[in-house]
Amino acid sequence: MFVKSFSKDCKEIMKDEKFRPLENYMTAKYSEWKTTDYTPNVELVGSLGSLGDIEIECKALLTEYEVNSEDFTEWTNNYLKKFQD
């Protein structure tokens, strides 16, 4: 991927002298992918955290596969109680 731009938040993260991009999971969004290009242009949006940290690894997987990991709403929990044994 070719990084075309950086979000404001990502620029702030990268200012930290301890930040190591190759040791972190980065989030990005596609900005364009021309039919004549082999790779897309992306905008780096932020950093999830360091490689090797189990919490970050889980967060990266959930983000990559677009899994909603938020708690159910109170309404949903009440509805689901109907189906409990």
Image (spheres, rainbow, N blue to C red):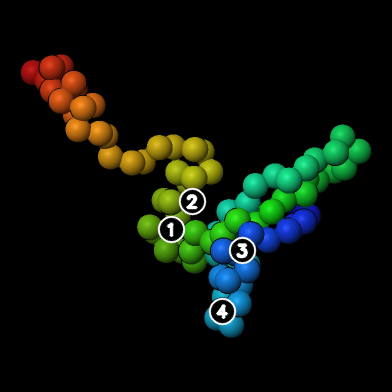
**What residue lies at 19% left-to-right and 22% top-to-bottom?**
80
Amino acid bearing label 2: Ala
Q: Is residue 45 left or right of residue 52?
A: right
The residue nearer to you, when weighing 57 against 47, is: 47
Between label 3 and label 2, give the one nearer the viewer.
3
- Label 3 CA crowd tier, 10 Å (few <14, some 14–19, many 20+): few
SS of the residue under disc 4:
loop
- Mark 4 or mark 3, earlier in chain: 3
Q: Which residue is mark 2?
A: 60
Q: Which residue is mark 1?
A: 56
**What residue lies at 53% left-to-right and 43% top-to-bottom?**
64
Q: Mark 1 and mark 2: span between their CA atoms? A: 6 Å
- Label 4 CA crowd tier, 10 Å (few <14, some 14–19, many 20+): few
- Label 1 CA crowd tier, 10 Å (few <14, some 14–19, many 20+): some
Residue reaching furthest to the left: 85
Amino acid bearing label 3: Lys
Q: Are marks 1 and 2 in contact (CB under 8 Å)?
A: yes
Q: Is residue 40 left or right of residue 80?
A: right
Q: Which residue is mark 3?
A: 8
Give the answer, above or below, for where 29 lies relative to 8.
Answer: above
Q: Mark 3 and mark 2: span between their CA atoms? A: 21 Å
Q: Are marks 4 and 1 in contact (CB under 8 Å)?
A: no
The residue nearer to you, when weighing 7 against 71, is: 7
- Label 2 CA crowd tier, 10 Å (few <14, some 14–19, many 20+): some
- Mark 4 or mark 2, earlier in chain: 4
